[in-house]
Amino acid sequence: MTKAGKVPPAIKVGRVKGILYLVDGWHRLEAGAIETLQDLSGNTLVKADVAEMSESQVRWEAAKANMGHGVPLRASEYREVFRAFVKAKQHIKKGGEYMSYREMSAIVGKGHTTLRTWALKDHPALAKKLGGVEHGNPEGTPCHGELLSLEEEHEQEALKALGAVVQHVDALASPEVRWGILKELEAAAARLRTAGVQEPQSSDF
């Protein structure tokens, strides 16, 4: 029972070749927020939902549960989530068709350009099948009839995010909130300067 007197959901366990792996419920186990019962010998048993899985499915189910706990993941953790997603073949639809980066993005929780970058580095075979300017078969991000490079896609995503900040400035009534946004922008500007910037040459004649 929880402190509020509610019965917690059962923990989730994957069975791989007879071996049990905890998929979801570690924090509940540590806190004792679990549903238990006694067997005929007086042993305490923990209620659990058990399913037959492959090792890759266990990794994906655990990663998926981790995303749903409400605690923001670090970029490295999201990358592990994506790796687990691909290894469990969750990117393949029922008909055998591959998801696009945008479709995977909606599930994994990171931008499609980030997933494309990770796929190129961690899953080159998948990246080649999905396509892109690197392989002569782009996924299809048109810009005035031309195909965007990976750098151009990142540029568009960055400008879109910046535009969203500008759009919401007037709605930020709290000076403290505006201060926090300003600090994030200043940190981003400092990182850009560290990475190196150069003012475009004027095309005026």
Image (cartoon, rainbow, N blue to C red):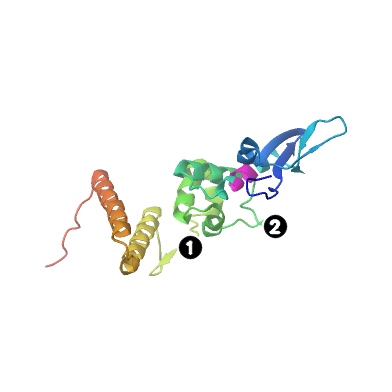
Residue 62 within the segment the image draws in magenta: yes
Residue drawn at the location 19% of the way across and 55% of the way down: 199
Residue range in magenta is 59-65
Cα distance in 3D space between marks 1 and 2 = 22 Å
Residue drawn at the location 30% of the way across and 59% of the way down: 178
The reply to whether residue 194 is in sight is yes
What amino acid is found at the position of numbered circle 1 in the picture?
A: Gly
Q: Secondary structure at mark 1?
A: loop
Task: Report whether 118 appears left or right of 69.
Answer: left
Using the image, determine if residue 190 lies above or below residue 96: above
Using the image, determine if residue 163 lies above or below residue 82: below
Q: Quadrant of the C terminus?
A: bottom left
The reply to whether residue 125 is in sight is no
Circle 1 Cα neighbour tier, 10 Å, few/some/many (<14 / 14–19 / ≥20)? few
In the picture of the structure, the residue carrying the numbered disc 2 is: 94
Taking depth in this image into account, of 110 and 177 the one nearest to the observer is 177
In the picture of the structure, the residue carrying the numbered disc 1 is: 140
Task: Report whether 46 appears left or right of 77.
Answer: right
Frontmost of labels 1 and 2 is 2
Q: Are marks 1 and 2 in contact (CB under 8 Å)?
A: no
